[in-house]
Image (cartoon, rainbow, N blue to C red):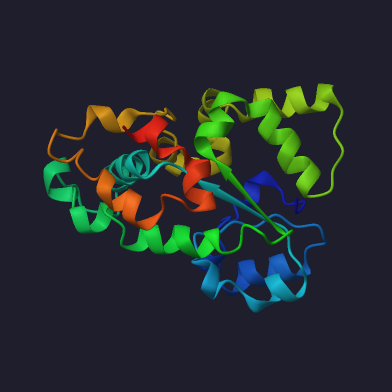
């Protein structure tokens, strides 16, 4: 990862980089760690040319929507909204989410792309860390994997979020649970499974997301 001091609080998402931050990133020694929410079709072309390793995180769509709802309501720069007003079948049922997922599904055969899921990491964080470290070219002893895992649990990151994310810590780190969507979706809102079956079921990424287990 890029060796940057915590106190600089440099944003991880490349789409938020201003000129000064971009300059610092360009001048930083390799290897560097960057994050983005960009659609794969508009990623910088240099990522493909330089065979940049890309770890892509997916979370089941229902929990993703709930997480985004709370992120919006807890973010002081965004207007608050009630759940029933926020929930939109067109938003949930596969506008940008499905487009994003389908685009990454086409890249799952790329040796420089590794897709991991939030649910898998919650189930076995150590195995996920081992998989990711091997993918990016690091061979970690078991003791170091366990050390990284201990510091990477949701509770550990939430406790340290004031240092890592400043005032945004409480906005970004809320529950970190699998299945919280069941506390929000009404019986009518739960009838969105057909959209998944039409768009993503049968796809390699769709199978990896294990929709039936986590969303039904």
Tell me, yes or no, if residue 160 can be seen here: no
Residue toward you, 28 or 140: 140
Residue 86 at what x, y percent from top left?
18, 49
7 relative position to 94: left or right = right
Residue name at image x 29 percent, y 48 percent: 72
Q: Is residue 210 above or below residue 25?
A: above
14 relative position to 202: left or right = right
Where is residue 61, by image quadrant? top left
Residue toward you, 139 or 99: 99
Residue name at image x 84 percent, y 48 percent: 137
| Residue that lies at the very extreme toward the front in this rendered image | 202
Residue name at image x 35 percent, y 62 percent: 96
- In which quadrant of the rendered image does the C terminus lie? top left
Tell me, yes or no, if residue 17 can be seen here: yes
64 relative position to 124: left or right = left
Q: Is residue 195 above or below residue 168?
A: below
Residue 125 at what x, y percent from top left?
63, 28
Residue 76 at what x, y percent from top left?
29, 48
86 relative position to 152: left or right = left
Residue 141 at what x, y percent from top left?
87, 28
Q: Is residue 150 above or below residue 32?
A: above
Q: How many marks?
A: 0
Residue name at image x 73 percent, y 58 percent: 53
């Amino acid at each position: 990862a890029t060796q940057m001091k915590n106190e600089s609080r440099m944003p991880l998402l490349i789409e938020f980089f201003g000129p000064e931050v971009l300059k610092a990133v360009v001048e930083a020694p390799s290897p560097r760690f960057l994050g983005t929410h960009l659609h794969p079709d508009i990623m910088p072309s240099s990522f493909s040319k330089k065979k940049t390793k890309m770890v892509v995180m997916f979370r089941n769509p229902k929990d993703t929507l709930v997480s985004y709802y709370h992120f919006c309501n807890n973010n002081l720069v965004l207007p608050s909204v009630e759940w029933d007003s926020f929930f939109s079948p067109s938003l949930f049922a596969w506008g940008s989410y499905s487009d994003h997922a389908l685009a990454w599904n086409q890249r799952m055969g790329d040796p420089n792309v590794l897709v991991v899921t939030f649910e898998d990491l919650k189930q076995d964080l150590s195995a996920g860390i081992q998989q990711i470290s091997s993918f990016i070219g690091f061979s970690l002893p078991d003791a170091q994997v366990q050390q990284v895992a201990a510091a990477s649990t949701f509770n550990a990151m939430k406790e340290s979020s004031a240092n890592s994310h400043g005032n945004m810590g409480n906005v970004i780190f809320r529950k970190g649970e699998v299945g919280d969507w069941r506390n929000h979706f009404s019986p009518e809102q739960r009838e969105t499974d057909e959209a998944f079956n039409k768009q993503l079921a049968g796809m390699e990424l769709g199978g990896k997301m294990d929709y039936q287990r986590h969303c039904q």
